[in-house]
Amino acid sequence: MASSNSTESGTHSHGRCAGPRMYCYHNEVAPLRVVKHNGPNQGKQFYGCPHWPQKTCGFFKWTHEVQNVDDLQYMVLEKDTAPIELEHEKKTLKKEVEELKAENEKLEDMVAELSIENTETRLFMEATMADKKLAVALIISWVFFAFVFFLI
């Protein structure tokens, strides 16, 4: 009796669901109906018990109320997926942190190697400067020796 027409009630059942599938308290599909009688609700859609008016269970929902329920269900679904998304983001960030730690260790090793090379280079340059000073002192002493030798 999903597609019943009732002239007494001023409603009309389409027998198909344009929106979400609703169930009455008999656990049967509640058909989408339209208010036909004159009044402020004329033309509005609602879901009602398929057994109305004989043995109705009292189930009645306006379609805009059902859409609000759909919105709430979507928000609940969205909130259900939020922890999963956050867990995924957490794993991704942990992986990124591990990669950055490994890169940091490599860079620290490179800095240590460069520091050692820098120290070795500085020591080499200091030794070279000492050799140059010694060479200059030696040349000056030879010149002085030659000058004194020729004066005598």
Image (spheres, grey):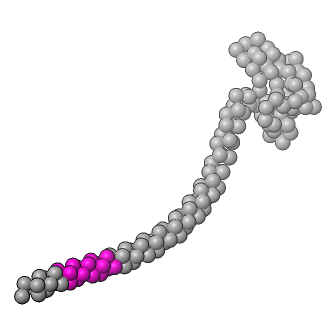
Observer able to see residue 56: no
Name the residue located 27 percent from the left edge and 82 percent from the top edge. Answer: 131
Taking the image as shown, residue 131 lies to the left or right of residue 82, namely: left
Which is the main secondary structure of the residues drawn in magenta?
A: helix
Query: Is 127 or 95 nearer to us in this picture?
Result: 127
Toward the viewer: 98 or 140?
140
Q: Which residue is painted at 79% across and 32% down in the image?
A: 19
Residue range (magenta): 123-141
Residue in the picture at 84% in, 42% down? 27
Q: Is residue 110 above or below residue 43?
A: below
Percent x, y for residue 96?
Answer: 56, 62
Figure quadrant of residue 43 = top right
Asked if residue 87 lies left or right of residue 31, the reply is: left
Residue 120, visible in the rendered structure: yes
In which quadrant of the rendered image does the N terminus lie? top right
Q: x, y percentage for residue 99?
A: 56, 66
Tag count? 0
Q: Position of residue 4 (x, y in %)?
A: 91, 26
Residue 75: quadrant of the picture: top right
Q: Height in image: 117 above or below 74?
A: below
> Which residue is more in the foreground, 27 or 114?
114
Give 83 or 43, whichever is nearer the viewer.
Answer: 83
Q: Is residue 31 left or right of residue 78?
A: right
For image coordinates 46% across by 72% down, the residue present is: 110
Reply yes or no: does residue 36 show up in magenta. Answer: no
Residue 40 % position (x, y): 70, 14
The quarter of the rendered structure image containing the C terminus is bottom left
